[in-house]
Amino acid sequence: MGAFGSRTEPEVGIAEGRALGCAVRVVVTDPRAVVEAKAAVDAVLRDIDDSCSRFRPGSELSRLNSTPGRKVSVSPLLGRALDVALRAAELSGGAVDPTVGAALKLAGYDRDFAALPAEGGAIRLVAIPVVGWQHVAFDRARGTAWVPAGVEIDLGATAKALATDMAADAALAVAGGGVLVSVGGDIATRGEIPPGGWQVQVSEDSGEAISDAAEAIRIWECGVATSSTTVRRWTRGGITLHHIIDPVTGLPAGGPWRTATVVAATCVDANTASTAAIVLGDAAVEWLEAGGLPARLVDHSGAVSRLAGWPQLIESPSR
């Protein structure tokens, strides 16, 4: 999902940066509060990275993954992230499963994406279902977690969405007014809504420049997320792979959609649905419509399907 862009928007404060390997944009309706808002967002994103990164050897998640078969005490933050990931798995019928970490490694995604070679030699891919989220034990009351041997938890998608929701809450607490936070195109809004709503550009790559030629919509207080197979991808032995794993096969999802964007009450719910849509393939249409989740699906030919009350497009002179 592209970030907030302005054609005829009222004056706002905008700050940009990078975190979690993604572009970050913070927009506030009170320009005087933008520095404080950005600092609050940065603090949340640092905490999430320190706790939930699969690639940081010293992260709390890495320590949990390194102690399979043992009950481990976890911090409230990692506990919340695990809880969110397991809820996403349940709501999606297992399409979004946090036990795909080992499958991602086998597919070549074994380090921070910025350090991942774009091309490499052939790797051996075997279709094996992942162990499954039902085998992970998280005790919310005691703050403990347990993962079985052979399982590596990956919180990539849901933790980024959770970070976006938490960052928007933190920005609102210090800035007041209205805030929009975009982390790698995952978007959360809070507080006052600008006249006519927040304007966002819909893009496969959140780093795309704001353009009048691109599709844009207006949103209110909600979350928006995009999952795509076209950005985080790499080639091994001439085969193009990507980071969205189908838990049924343990391989990168091979359905008809290259991009799915969903609007939901929170960024976490939007991200759960957009990731599930890529994995579910053709079945995603009925699933999204049954859930009343406004969505925009793009197939591999570039054809676009808009479902379940997708927000009305903003017209511009160039369209």
Image: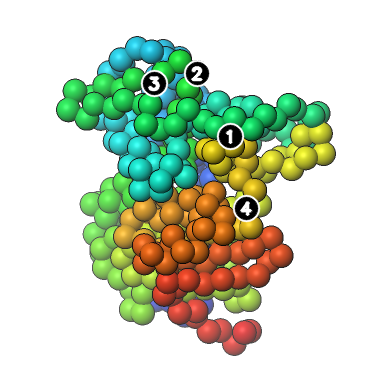
Q: Residue at x 37, y 31 (%)?
A: 134
Point out which mark residue 289 bears: none
Q: Nearer the viewer, mark 3 or mark 1?
A: 1
Where disc 1 sits, the SS reads loop
Within 10 Å of disc 3 (Cα), the crowding (few <14, some 14-19, many 20+) is many
Question: Which quadrant holds the C terminus?
Answer: bottom right
Within 10 Å of disc 4 (Cα), the crowding (few <14, some 14-19, many 20+) is some
Q: Where is residue 205 in the image (x, y as percent from the top left)?
A: 60, 56
Q: How far apart are marks 4 and 1 (CA)?
A: 14 Å
| Quadrant of the image occupied by residue 299 | bottom right
Q: How far apart are marks 3 and 1 (CA)?
A: 18 Å
Mark closer to the chain start, 4 or 2: 2
* Depth check, front residue: 96 or 160: 96
* Depth check, front residue: 97 or 302: 97
Within 10 Å of disc 1 (Cα), the crowding (few <14, some 14-19, many 20+) is many
Residue labelled with disc 4: 255
Point out which mark residue 250 bears: 1
Q: Position of residue 188 (x, y in %)?
A: 37, 57
Q: Is residue 138 left or right of residue 131?
A: left
Where disc 3 sits, the SS reads loop
Mark closer to the chain start, 2 or 1: 2
Q: Distance between the residues labelled 2 and 1?
A: 13 Å
Residue labelled with disc 2: 150
Q: What's the amino acid at mark 2?
A: Gly
Q: Distance between the residues labelled 3 and 2?
A: 9 Å
The answer to whether 126 is drawn above or below residue 65 in the figure is below
Mark closer to the chain start, 4 or 3: 3
Q: Residue at x 56, y 59 (%)?
A: 282
Residue labelled with disc 3: 147
Q: What's the amino acid at mark 1?
A: Gly
Q: Residue at x 67, y 29 (%)?
A: 126
